[in-house]
Amino acid sequence: MAEPTADEPKPRTRRPPRRKQNEQLVRRYFDAIARRDVEGMIACCAPEVVEDQVAMHVLRGRDELRAAFAGLFAAAPDLETTVSRVVADERQAVVEWRMGGTFSGSPYEGFEPTGKRVELRGLDLFEIEEGLIQSTTAYFDGMAFARGVGLLPAADSGAERAIKGAFNAVTRLRRAVNERVGS
């Protein structure tokens, strides 16, 4: 292929469609999470980014996001993150993900490290404008987190059955008291 002469226009390079750009943006964001690179994550976000971690709290702005993920990475130094699926359009992207790590580092969300392995799966819904993440709603299995760190007993264990039994007994007692008071 001959190089264009000074008289000929240079061939135009095409920008990928916005859908593809948005997919690339959220993949960069999750690649940074996988590397435990907080600043790489922040570079993908608008200054006023809002992340609603449905199972926990809402983070507002880059500083809160930076602190939350620095805390997560310090709490689980071996944290591994994988992306299962990405779907994007012109304004949004959805990422299905998995995380796993050992809660062996710093305290996290007020809990002392237990040395236990935590496995989570979740889904993030991103709103994207001007090439930056504006907001994220992150859905993940809070019960799996609580079980993983040891806050709740293992599923189907004797301890779980005992907790359910005690809860149901209290519920029945409250119902009986309310019925008696109401009559």
Image (tube, rainbow, N blue to C red):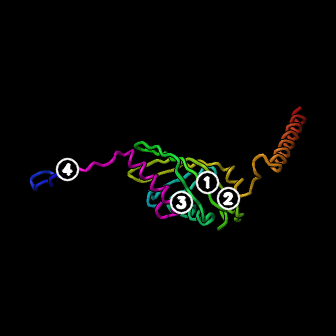
- Between label 3 and label 4, give the one nearer the viewer: 4
Instruction: Report the quarter where the C terminus lies.
Output: top right
Dot 2: element: strand
Secondary element under disc 4, as helix, strand or loop, is loop
Cα distance, mark 3 to mark 4? Answer: 42 Å
Determine which residue is flagged by label 4: 11
Residue at left offset 86%, top offset 39%: 172
What numbered label is drawn on residue 65?
A: 3
The answer to whether mark 3 and mark 4 are in CB contact below 8 A is no
Q: Amino acid at mark 2?
A: Arg
Label 3: which secondary element: helix
Q: Which mark is residue 57?
A: 1
Q: Tell me the kind of residue under disc 4.
A: Pro
Q: Earlier in the sequence, mark 4 or mark 2?
A: 4
Q: Residue furthest front?
A: 1
Residue 182 locus on image (x, y percent): 87, 34
CA neighbours of label 4 inside 10 A, class few (<14), some (14 to 19), many (20+) = few
Cα separation between marks 3 and 1: 11 Å
- Residue range (magenta): 11-40
The answer to the question of whether label 2 and label 3 lie on touching residues, with beta carbons closer than 8 A, is: no
| Overall secondary structure of the magenta section | helix
Mark 2 — residue? Answer: 117
Whichever of callouts 2 and 3 sits on the residue coming sooner in the sequence is 3
Q: Residue 3 at x, y = what percent?
A: 15, 55
Q: Report if residue 109 lies within the magenta region.
A: no
Frontmost residue, 15 versus 45: 15
Q: Is residue 4 left or right of residue 13?
A: left
